Image: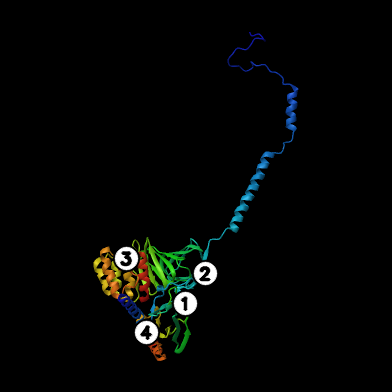
Amino acid sequence: MEMVKITLFALALAAVSAYGKDFSLTIGNPVALALPDGVKKKDAGMAVRVENCADVAKAQVTATAEGIVNGARRSVPVRLFAATTPGAFAVSRDWPWEGAWVVYLTGHCGASTASAVVPFGPNGFLRESSKFFPRAATAAEVEAVLKTLSGGAQ
Amino acid sequence: MKMPDEKPPLGPIEPGQLPLVKAPDTIWRSIEAALDKKPEPRRTSLFAAWQWAAASVLVIGAVGAWYATRPELPSWQVSRLEGSAAVDKIKVGEWLQTDGNSRARITVGDIGVVDVEPNTRIRLVAASPSEHRLTLARGEISATVSAPPRLFLVDTPASTAVDLGCAYKIKTDQSGDGILRVTSGWVSLEWKGRESLVPAGANCRTRPGTGPGTPYFDDAPEALQQALSAFDFGKGGEESLGTVLAQARVRDTLSLWHVLSRVEPRDRVRVVDRMVDLVPLPAGVARDKALQLDPATLKSWREELAWKW
C-alpha cells in the first residue's frame, strides 16, 4: 500500500512538473510543420506551436500583422493553418512585401495566455529580435518591436 | 559433180549451197493482218500507273493528316523581362539562351514561373503532368513554384534541385560549380544518392563529381561557411570539422544534422554531442540510433530541430 502511495505521488509530481512550466509559444521554420493536403509550406512565413499546454488540442492561436508602409501604420489579419500535429500552425504570409512588418501572435491554453512579437526582414522572420511574453503583449510592446524594426530598416 | 538428191556433206555450209523455197501465202496474210491491226491498250501497265498514283495520294494524305493532327510537343510560354528575347515559347527539347543584357520569364505550365537571368542557357526537358524538368547548363534562374513536392526539377551539371514547395535561386558557372539559395519553403538538392535539404534562408553549394555540400544559413558565421566548404570540397578533414563544431550556433544545427551522416563513424559522437549541447535531444530521439544513422530517428530529430531554424 505504501508503494502504491509513493508511486501515485511520484506520478502526480511528474504531471505537475510537466505542466507546471509556463504556457508559451515557439516559432520556427515552416519546414518543421507537417501540413495537411492543400496547405503549402511555401505560403507560410513561419511556424508556431504551443508549449506546455495540458490540452493541446484545444489550444488556440491568433495572429495579426502590424506594419508601417510609407510612414502609415497598418494592421492586417493573418491566417493560421493547423498542422497535422496538434497545437502547431503555419502562419500565412498575408501582409504586403513593402514596408516594415511584425507579426503579433497570441496563444490561449485554458486560462493561460502567451504571446510573441516576431519581426520580419526581407529573408523571413528574425528570431533574434523576436519578443516572447507569458501573457498578451501590450500595444506599446508591439509598437516598440515595430519601431525598432522600421528604424533599422530606414 | 553432185547429184540433186545427194545429201549435203556434214560441215560448214557454203553460200549458195541451200536451196531457195517459197513461203506459203498463208504466212504473208497472217503477217499483213498483224501489221494492220491497231495496237491494243496496254492494260497492265496503265493499271499499275493508276495504282501508283492512288497509293501516292493515300500516303501523302496520311502523312498530311498525321502532321496536321499530331500531338504538339508541350511548350511553356516565354516573355521578355529585359533586353531582346526573340522567342515567345520554349518546347520540350529546345534551349533558351539569354545574352548579357536580356532577362526572360518562363511560365511553368500553371504551377509557377522561372526568371532567367542574363548569360544563362537553359533547356526544357519535360513538361508532363507528372514531371516539369529543366536543365540549367550555365547562368542563373529564380524559380517560384506552387506544386506538389517533387514535380518541378532543375538539373545542373553538379546536382538536381527538387522542389518541395518553394521559391529559390540557383546559379551555375562554366565549370559546373553551383550554389542554391532558398527564399521560401525548401528544396532538396540531390546527386547520386547524396541529398541536402535546404530550407528558406539557407544556401547550399554544389560541385561536379561531389554533388551537394552542406547547407548553411545566410547569417551563419563566415568561419563556419568556409570550414563547411573545406569539409565538403577541399578535403578539410579534422581541422575543418573542428571549426564547424566550434562555430555552430543553435540555428546551425541545420548544418550539423547534415554533417552527422557525412563524417567518419568515429567522428559521429563529436557531432551528436555538439548538437545536444546546442539543442537538448528531444523526447523520442534515441542517441544510439542517431549514431547508427537510423533514418526514422534522423528524420524525427530534423523535424524537431527545424523549430530552431
Q: CA distance from mark 4 to mark 2?
A: 40 Å
Q: Chain of mark 1?
A: A
Q: Are marks 4 and 1 on the same chain?
A: yes
The residue that disc 4 covers is: A132
Q: Nearer the viewer, residue A13 or B11?
A: A13
The residue that disc 1 covers is: A81
Q: Is residue A3 above or below residue B34?
A: below
Q: Nearer the viewer, residue B80 or B183?
A: B183
Rendered residue at 26%/67% (across/down): B269
The residue that disc 2 covers is: B110
Question: Which percent across, then down, holds residue A67?
Answer: 44, 86
- Residue A82 in view (yes/no): yes
Q: Residue furthest left?
A: B239
Rendered residue at 63%/47% (across/down): B55
Q: Is residue A118 above or below residue B209?
A: below
Q: Are marks 2 and 3 on the same chain?
A: yes
The residue that disc 3 covers is: B289
Q: CA distance from mark 4 to mark 3?
A: 34 Å
Q: Chain of mark 2?
A: B
Mark toward the viewer: 2 or 3: 3
Q: Residue furthest front?
A: A1
Q: Amino acid at mark 3?
A: Lys
Q: Quadrant of residue B208?
A: bottom left
Q: Amino acid at mark 4?
A: Phe
Q: CA distance from mark 4 to mark 1?
A: 21 Å
